[in-house]
């Protein structure tokens, strides 16, 4: 039996594996359905792919990368960084690729994880399947009848678009990166927009080689840059979104900044109107770009804002008419709430089905990590888990939570943990009160945002409505009595099961 099975070899799963190894767990199994590690940075390969926040903030704080070529690094550099982390921390030997997990079930004192014809047994189960891992295909009449090439941004294939008529459905953060690149090749580009997006200028620039050498020789210099970038992102997130009721003026300033950027790049007032969101800043994830708006001023690019009513063998139809196309590009994002929470059936104690329980009792997870009724389960991609604008803030908060929890278990000779119903209920009420009382999600104009922040019940349960400082503090100091900790025979079980792990724990402390 493995110490732990981790599902997902993206940055979240790798972070969990690093923390468990630090805690002394040596028998880890990381299962990944794709053919290599990296998560979204392995799957996504569309033109223009880049991180959408400053690169120094989008990395593990304990493993800074001095080699970013730009402030907003391209996707292939994130993939290389993931490979570097896996090699440095010895994670690859624990990984198995091309293994799609189909279900997990709690059995008395361990988890059984099914993947095809195989079943794996582990003391602990960690699900790190990613928020953006299930591509969404739009429900449009006739889409399967289109005879030309169909590309989804999450399953991109190299394609020669020169001289071709291209249609893009979707204008989210991915499309903002992709559309300018498509416009450079296509002879005609039609963009079908359901919801405009708030876009601000992108302070992107190459990082000169001397600066990279400085970062490599003096890591604290890069940490200072990381701190500055994190502070700016925190200001945007906290002032404009989480504390909307108290700092509404900050939200208005963010809107003004984005409108001014649009006005500088688009002179046509009607086109500006069509590209301007009618919802509050922060209801939907905003993004950065220096060429997205300008692309729509090119003579061969057309913005279509009426709804798509159908697709046939050679074209797309809206209320404004029909457009002949050669290539259909789906920048329609991911399905979070219907099929990704959880990404496969998870059955806990007394047969509790996690997906059904979430849908019947609200989406919830204590500190964004654990769920009552699911012993020894760490759910990393959970409701109220995403903290700040950098995913690495979330990852490291969860690593800290794991460290505190497993250290307490070791001290008490416990082998099983489960968050109490009381603690979970109290946490849920605190989060709901903050969302409804302070945030833009409840007090702003969000009805037309069509944002993945909201679940199918209309509740904004993805983001944690606190500061990242508050999230880190909670991870370091949550009450240990919020968990029921148990073991077979107290310290005797500890000595029998984890004696071999103690020297490594001391070396990592």
Image (tube, rainbow, N blue to C red):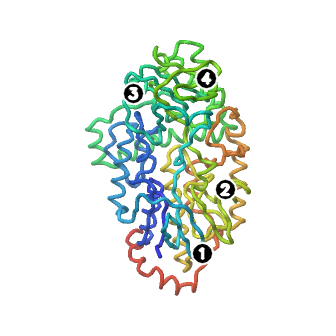
Camera-side residue of 346 and 90: 346
Eyeballing the image, is 31 above or below 441?
A: below
Residue 102 at x, y = what percent?
54, 61
Identify the element where label 1 is drawn: strand
Q: Where's the C terminus, which quadrant? A: bottom left
Residue 397 at x, y = what percent?
52, 56
Instruction: Please give the name of the residue rendered at 71% of the width and 50% of the height, measured from the top-left corner.
Output: 432
Camera-side residue of 350 and 223: 350
Residue pointed to by mark 2? 364
Residue pointed to by mark 1? 107
Q: Which mark is residue 303?
A: none
Residue extending farthest to the top is 268
Image marks 2 and 1: residues in contact by CB distance under 8 Å: no
Instruction: Please give the name of the residue rendered at 70% of the width and 32% of the height, measured from the top-left corner.
Output: 445
Q: Nearer the viewer, mark 2 or mark 1?
A: 1
Q: Is residue 209 left or right of residue 247?
A: left
Measured in 3D between alpha carbons, the distance from the residue under mark 3 to the one under mark 4, in whole angstroms, is 23 Å
Q: Nearer the viewer, mark 3 or mark 4?
A: 3
Q: Which mark is residue 161?
A: 3
Is residue 502 something that shows in the picture?
Answer: yes
Residue 438 at x, y = what percent?
70, 42
């Amino acid at each position: 039996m493995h110490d732990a099975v981790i599902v997902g070899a993206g940055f979240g799963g790798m972070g969990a594996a690093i923390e468990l190894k630090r805690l002394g767990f040596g028998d880890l199994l990381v299962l990944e359905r794709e053919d290599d590690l990296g998560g979204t940075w392995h799957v996504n390969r569309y033109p223009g792919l880049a991180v959408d926040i400053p690169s120094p903030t989008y990395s593990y704080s304990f493993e800074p990368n001095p080699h970013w070529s730009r402030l907003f690094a391209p996707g292939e550099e994130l993939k290389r960084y993931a490979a570097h982390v896996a090699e440095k921390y010895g994670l690859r030997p624990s990984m198995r690729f091309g293994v799609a997990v189909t279900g997990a079930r709690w059995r008395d004192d361990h988890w059984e994880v099914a993947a095809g014809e195989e079943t794996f047994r582990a003391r602990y189960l960690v699900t790190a399947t990613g928020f953006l891992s299930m591509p969404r295909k739009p429900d449009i009449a006739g889409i399967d009848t289109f005879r030309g090439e169909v590309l989804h941004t999450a399953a991109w294939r190299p394609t020669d678009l020169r001289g071709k008529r291209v249609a893009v459905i979707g204008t989210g953060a991915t499309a903002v990166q992709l559309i300018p690149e498509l416009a450079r090749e296509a002879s005609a580009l039609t963009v079908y927009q359901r919801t405009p997006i708030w876009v601000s200028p992108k302070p992107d620039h190459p990082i000169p080689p001397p600066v990279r050498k400085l970062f490599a020789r003096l890591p604290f210099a890069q940490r200072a840059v990381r701190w500055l970038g994190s502070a700016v992102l925190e200001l945007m997130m906290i002032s404009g979104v989480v504390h909307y009721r108290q700092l509404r003026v900050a939200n208005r300033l963010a809107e003004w900044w984005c409108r001014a950027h649009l006005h500088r790049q688009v002179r046509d007032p009607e086109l500006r109107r069509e590209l301007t969101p009618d919802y509050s800043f922060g209801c939907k994830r905003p993004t950065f770009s220096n060429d997205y708006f300008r692309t729509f001023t090119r003579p061969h690019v057309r913005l279509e804002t009426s709804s798509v009513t159908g697709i046939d063998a050679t074209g797309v139809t809206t209320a404004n008419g029909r457009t002949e196309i050669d290539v259909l590009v789906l920048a329609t994002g991911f399905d979070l709430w219907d099929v990704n929470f959880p990404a496969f059936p998870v059955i806990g104690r007394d047969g509790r089905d996690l997906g059904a329980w979430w849908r019947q009792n609200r989406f919830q997870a204590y500190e964004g990590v654990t769920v009552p009724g699911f012993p020894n389960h760490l759910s990393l991609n959970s409701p109220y888990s995403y903290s700040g604008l950098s995913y690495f803030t979330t990852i490291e908060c969860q690593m800290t939570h794991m460290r505190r929890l497993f250290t307490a278990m070791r001290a008490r000779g416990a082998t099983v943990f489960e968050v109490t119903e009381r603690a979970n209920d109290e946490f849920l009420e605190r989060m709901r009160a903050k969302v409804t009382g302070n945030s833009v999600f409840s007090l702003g104009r969000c009805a037309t945002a069509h944002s993945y922040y909201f679940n199918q019940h209309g509740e904004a349960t993805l983001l944690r409505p606190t500061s990242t400082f508050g999230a880190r503090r909670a991870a370091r100091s949550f009450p240990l009595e919020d968990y029921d900790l148990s073991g077979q025979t107290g310290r005797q079980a500890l000595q029998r099961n984890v004696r071999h792990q103690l020297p490594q724990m001391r070396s990592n402390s």
